[in-house]
Amino acid sequence: MTSLSDEQWMRLALDQARLAADAGEVPVGAVVVQNGQVIATGRNAPIASHDPTAHAEVVALREAARVLGNYRLDGCTLYVTLEPCAMCSGAMLHARLDRVVFGAADPRTGVAGSVLNLFGHTQLNHQTQVTGGVLADACAQLLQDFFKPKRVNADPVREDALRTPDAAFAGLPDYPWPPRYVNDLPSIAGLRMHYLDEGPQDAPLTWLCLHGNPAWSYLYRKMIPVWLAAGHRVVAPDLIGFGKSDKPKKDRFHQFETHRQSLLDLLARLDVQRVVLVVQDWGGIVGLTLPMAAPARYKGLLVMNTTLATGEQPLSAGFLAWRDWCQSQPQFDVGKLFARGNPGMTPAETAAYNAPFPDKGFRAALRAFPPMVPAMADAPGAAISRQAQAFWQRDWQGQSLMAIGQQDPVLGEPVMRHLQSQIRGCPEPMLLPDAGHFVQEQGRAIAEAAVRHFKP
Ligand SMILES: [Zn+2]
């Protein structure tokens, strides 16, 4: 009877090990050979079979015994890719196996010479012959490949930042759009910024939706479908520190100029054209300073409760009260804040506003933004805001539309009327008597009016 060499039988055991790896099990394989024939195979399967004893050798021994109709495996040799453990070696001795041939040594649990040699005890009544090191490199390589990280993380979180787990955003109501990310914007290199980008690239209009504190692009969920239905494009980023974007750990990361530049970088990267800038709250405080940097990109401005904080006039009493409240309530419930002004919001919608902030480590932006509104003429952001004011008054060539949520105590009608006077050609505002600060929660009607107002 011709017999294949040990190496050739070991190759069959390696095939079994690969099958184990494919199944997500540690890749160890075995075959039992008798009279020059494989009578049984086995592969490691403890996970799938919920069986701590389902090592390749035990599986193969059971199969061989079943095939032979005998629990004694006289005349059999077992080939296994890894040095057997105590359990498997014990089973082989009980089976009175003639010979065991293994591939790679296992310095942690191997008992065929590595940790100890169970087969070397002459007191035991049965002696099983041992051969080790057959195709050892191939057998070890398979294990190394299996334990190597599955792939290098191409998108690591910067050490000074946190990333809200994706699971926090699972199943949000009325927010079906896939996330898009950019992590190499020059001003915030290594921080991952999230944005929505829906509709055709060559659409006649692109609605650039900028949220404020403590919101995120979720705030625009009622307006986005209206614009997409009109065949337009929508780009809605989450500011760094908010939504699905990375969250720097330190409050001091958050600077007016950093956020402004990160948005300019994103717009340059996406090369948006024929833009209607849609702003509210910080979306406007920063966003209204953007068009003067590249006026040719912009066709229109849709402005809701916000301001240009030039530092020349004192901040409104409503804003100062908000700023004080944020400071005294550093752990305030973000979702409840939205629900307070929007009693129609469902619990799931309320939760969506809390989703970006699983614990206080994620909340640096919430702490940093209120004090960052320029209050003095020399405050960071004030000078650029004055330049923007001049741009809107003198140089703005596009169409404008203003919508005011009249229930807003912070950036309501008086603040907005003042802003209207600073925007060249801004018509009489659209007034929403029931809307509060987060005007977008009643945004469907505004979006529909805007489609009629802005002519491509
Ligand atoms: Zn074992």
Image: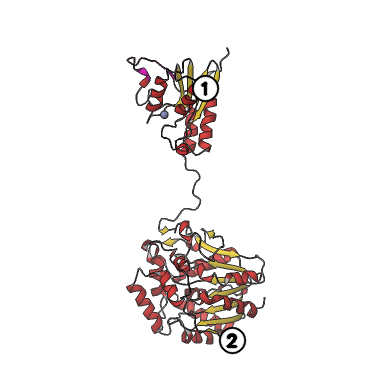
Q: Is residue 128 magenta?
A: yes
Q: Quadrant of the N terminus?
A: top right
Q: Which residue is mark 2?
A: 427
Q: Which mark is residue 67?
A: 1
| Tag 2: amino acid | Pro
Seen in the picture, residue 311 relative to 348 is either above or below; the reply is below
| Tag 1: amino acid | Val
- Residue 250, percent across and down? 38, 63
Q: Which mark is residue 401?
A: none
SS under mark 1: helix
Image-quadrant location for residue 376: bottom left
Furthest-top residue in this view: 1
- Residue 232, percent across and down? 64, 70
SS under mark 2: loop
Say which label, 2 or 1, has the lower sequence index: 1
Distance of label 2 from label 1 (alpha carbons): 89 Å
Quadrant of the rendered image holding ligand 1: top left
Name the residue nearer the viewer: 410 or 168: 168
Q: Is residue 166 magenta?
A: no
Seen in the picture, residue 412 relative to 29 is either above or below; the reply is below
Q: How many marks are shown on the rendered structure?
A: 2
For discs 2 and 1, the disc positioned in front in the rendered view: 1
Task: Identify the residue shown where x is 38% and y is 15%.
Answer: 126
Task: Identify the residue shown where x is 34% and y is 73%.
Answer: 327
Q: Quadrant of the C terminus?
A: bottom right
- Residue 379, percent across and down? 41, 77
Q: Residues within 10 Å of mark 2 (few under 14, many from 20)?
A: few
Which residues are the magenta region? Answer: 119-131
- Residue 107, percent across and down? 38, 29
